[in-house]
Amino acid sequence: MRLDEVVGQVRHCIRAMHGYVPGKQPGEGAYIKLNTNENPYPPSPRVLTALREAVGADLRLYSDPVALHLREAAAALYGCAVDEVIAGNGSDDILTMIFRTFLNAGDVIVTPSPSYTLYNALSALQDAPCQEIPMGPDYTLPADLDAHGAKVVFIVNPNAPTGVLHAREAIRAFLERTQSIVVLDEAYADFAGESAIDMLHDFPHLIVVRTFSKSYALAGMRLGLGFARREVIAEMMKVKDSYNLDRLAIVAGCAALHDQEWLRETRDTIIRTRTWLQQALTEMGLHVPPSRSNFVFPTIPDGRAAAVFEGLEQRRILVRYFRGSRVADSLRVTVGTDAEVEAFVQALHDLLA
Ligand SMILES: Cc1ncc(COP(=O)(O)O)c(C=O)c1O
């Protein structure tokens, strides 16, 4: 068989898609990195100690396929049953499981836009079209979100890339009226202090997704959680990779959940810096939606967002720019340390002068 014949055998929907483009990941220290919403602080010392202790001969053995200890710790923390939790290799893994579990080719998914761009890539993989329903200028849920025959609706809350939180009442009202499965992607919920995990018992069509990549400073460990009714989790268990979390990830996740004091302190520090950053941008005359996450989303006036993005990169400051999208007039900026954020504000000030 010739190579072009091999490539010709690739599924049509894969050939037709572009593939998800993650934010740039340069080597350590090369840039001030405010582009992928990582935590600027190191993980809890308890996580690092637990990891060091776990590095040993046991690594020759497979990890627990169902990550029981991690799910037990999550169930205790979030007040649900162990069989209402599933663990993932990052929350992207949980999202992949949801797509594989629910979506046949041709099924429609809907997301209020702007939204997490990975949903587009996952829907293309599954040959299940993704419809983006624009949010209004204040980024509230679109009134017609339910009018598109979606099998699954994906809502990021607090939203990415805007940082705006949909109030619990709005989420509850949508869950009450919709006939779709609703996935709440709560990647940034720890920074908002609000979650819908406690609504699971009222709404069997709700799935909540969480990550350790942001608030727990563990993006490099790849850890996520999914919460749903036990019958739904049982189906998702069938589609996950057998050993989707490695031994070290499970150890790190347990230690992270057991150090809530570290989480509170780190989160409070990031929120203090976020408040300062938001204020500084507003004083520069920029519009910034009220962020409840660990990033802000200023609009850059006069069509200069692309130029400012490039100017920042030349000054070795990375932020996220969604070129060619309907939010191409804005930049998403992670809340870093005070020093990183001050350097960003200074550079932005110079570029806009
Ligand atoms: C809304 C949203 N969901 C999920 C993820 C993926 O996180 P993870 O690192 O857990 O795969 C991200 C990462 O940026 C995100 O912004």
Image: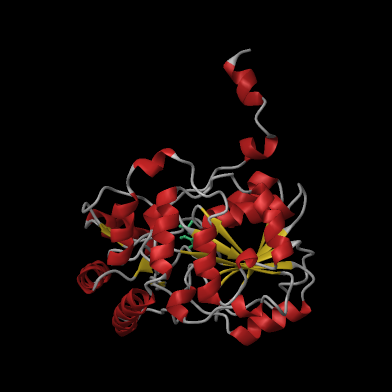
Is residue 116 among what the camera can see? no
Instruction: Tell me where residue 328 appears, x and y as whole percent.
Output: 47, 62
Residue 72, can we see it? yes
Residue 79 left/right relative to 100: left
Please tell me which residue is depicted at 59% across the width and 63% down the height of the picture.
226
Q: How many marks?
A: 0
Quadrant housing residue 304: bottom left
Compared across the picture, whether 258 is left or right of 53 comes to right
Q: Quadrant of residue 169?
A: bottom right
Name the residue at the front extreme: 57
Is 124 positioned to the left or the right of 164 in the image? right
Q: Position of residue 96 (x, y in %)?
A: 60, 52
Residue positioned most to the top: 1
Q: What residue lies at 80% left-to-right and 71% top-to-bottom? A: 179
Q: Viewed as shown, does residue 158 lie left or right of 13?
A: left
State the image quarter where residue 36 is shown.
bottom left
In the rendered image, residue 270, in percent from the top left (x then y), is placed at 32, 76
Quarter holding the N terminus is top right
Which residue is at a point 37% across and 53% down the rendered structure image?
220
Above-or-below relation of 178 to 71: below
60 and 349: which is toward the camera: 60
